[in-house]
Amino acid sequence: MQSLSLYFTLITLLWIYWLWTRRKFYSLFLKLRGPLGYPFIGMAHHLIRREEVLAKLSVYNQMYGPVWCSWVGPYPFVVISDPVIAQEVLLSPNCVNKCFIYNGLDYTVGSSLFSLKEPRWSVHRKIFNPAFNHKILLSFIPLFNEEVDALVLTLDKYAGKGPVDLMQNIQTYTLCLATRTTMGGVSIDRDQFEKTLVQSYQSALEHTADVVFSPWLKCEFLQRMRGKQKKYSRAKMDINRFVRKVGFHSIRLRVNLRIALTSTCFKLVNAQLSTDDSGERSPDNSLFIDIAIENFKCDRFTRTSVDNECGAIVFGAFETTANSIVYTLMLLAMFPNCQEKVYEELLSEFPEMGNLNITYNNTQNLIYMDMVLNETMRVLAPVPLVARETMNDIKLSNGVTLPSGVQIAIDIFNMHRRKDIWGPEADTFNPDNFLSANMQNKHSYAFIPFTKGLRYCIGWKYALLSTKITLAKLLRNYKFTTYFKFENLKFVEDITLKLQQLPLFTIERRNE
Ligand code: HEM
């Protein structure tokens, strides 16, 4: 009995001490409402059931409004689904650092653009911005076309047959694409990709989500108990080996090219480079990996930085793009009238059947498809939540001051579905939401699938261009159907949006 009361006294004292250490945040809790959760853990228990996180946030948004606060363990968290406040946060130089949960990324894929803090982040970001400029994106178009043609050949095997799970094929495709465009991995062995690398990347993503949402799973002993330790370490090794192999191959190829360029046949080689279908380009038109290696040579990057950045860029590019492609096809299969409208637009842009060579201008003419893609990313926000940490106090226009050290979550998923912004049908799919007349009075931060502000997605233009070319070719060649209903979709909060059950598709060849 005596030991029990000692135990409770100790816990109470600990809690009082804990409350005292958090005192600078109390003013925040006087200004903003929100659920406080349990002592010590706050609302951290909600993160364990990831299939409920987005729905729970929606309930709290309705109860406490579009800006509310809570605790996750010792960290005060402000949750925002208001475009005006989201804009203030995303544009503030005091909110450039990512929230503590991104440390999970450092643990699995290593520290990179995704998780770096200031002042390192600005340096890396400035260095890598040119890797995705307009000129470089245009030079990727032949490669995008070539890779989608290979995908179409693969999908032909399933046309007219039973239902198929598209995700594996599309992920293999986007992984090839991401690798070739960032690392120049000349001819990639698709068999190797399918059998090992896609699985390794999937395991790495699963591992990252595990440690981001349940940080105690960084403990190897716990992972071993769950039977996942071996799988995760093998995946990490496979990815590192692959990055080094492709990187080494790229460097060797580039050295050979430089030798060739200094020789008398400069013009000839240059002409070959501009038409080369291997994805290689002239040396002044650098790929992501070239930039990383150049910075390694002049001691701005360590070898680990090069490995981490190259591994992470592929990691960040392939899954987001694959999800956007598959989710768009899924919604078009669920809403066949919209699919027919996309098809009619494609027929008028590409009247001839056969291997299409899609140009940048073509993608600019596909207005309805653009609306469909935007609507997919609105109703199924590819990255449902992003989070930051305040580096200094920041004063918001609603009169609230966020002290330094506050964690901020921007609830993109629920902001994209706010009925007061998107109308009473905000929860369903309707590409007409993106008619210019319907977008006129919307705040520019009401739709932020790639976020905006200082730390927006470095690959957003790349993602839109590659996704549009892929969708145009697939939808011009095939009709997609599914029995799954939109109302039955269940969402899982992960680093990217996941579905509890991914619908199967039936694919039919278009004959015209
Ligand atoms: C549909 C596809 C994509 C979506 C929806 C998407 C979305 C996002 C979002 C929301 C962020 C901000 C994350 C945060 O603030 O925590 C982000 C960051 C980032 N994305 Fe993307 N992304 C996509 C494709 C790509 C591609 C293709 C690449 C690379 C080629 C890429 C590379 C990155 C990088 C490096 C960052 C970190 C930027 C920084 O912090 O400076 N993403 N992305």
Image (tube, helix red, strand yellow):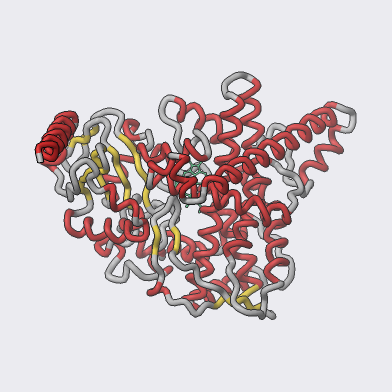
Instruction: From the viewer's side, name the closer residue of 461 and 505.
Output: 505
- Residue lying farthest right? 264
Q: Residue at x 70, y 72 (%)?
A: 156
- Displayed quadrant of residue 153: bottom right
- Residue lying farthest front? 1
Q: Residue at x 82, y 41 (%)?
A: 271
Q: Locate the N terminus by quadrant.
A: top left
Instruction: From the viewer's side, name the closer residue of 496 and 275.
Output: 496
Visible residue check, residue 462? no
Q: Residue at x 71, y 40 (%)?
A: 246
Q: Residue at x 45, y 36 (%)?
A: 115
Q: Is residue 398 left or right of residue 388?
A: left
- 512 to 121, vertically: above or below: below
- Residue lying farthest top? 299
Visible residue check, residue 495? yes
Percent position (x, y) of residue 409? 31, 45
Q: Is residue 13 left or right of residue 213?
A: left
Percent position (x, y) of residue 222? 43, 44
Q: Is residue 137 left or right of residue 96?
A: right
Percent position (x, y) of residue 474? 63, 67
Query: Number of numbered discs present?
Result: 0
- Displayed quadrant of residue 130: top right
- 453 to 361, vertically: above or below: above
- 352 to 62, vertically: above or below: below
Q: Locate the C terminus by quadrant.
A: bottom right
Percent position (x, y) of residue 247? 69, 36
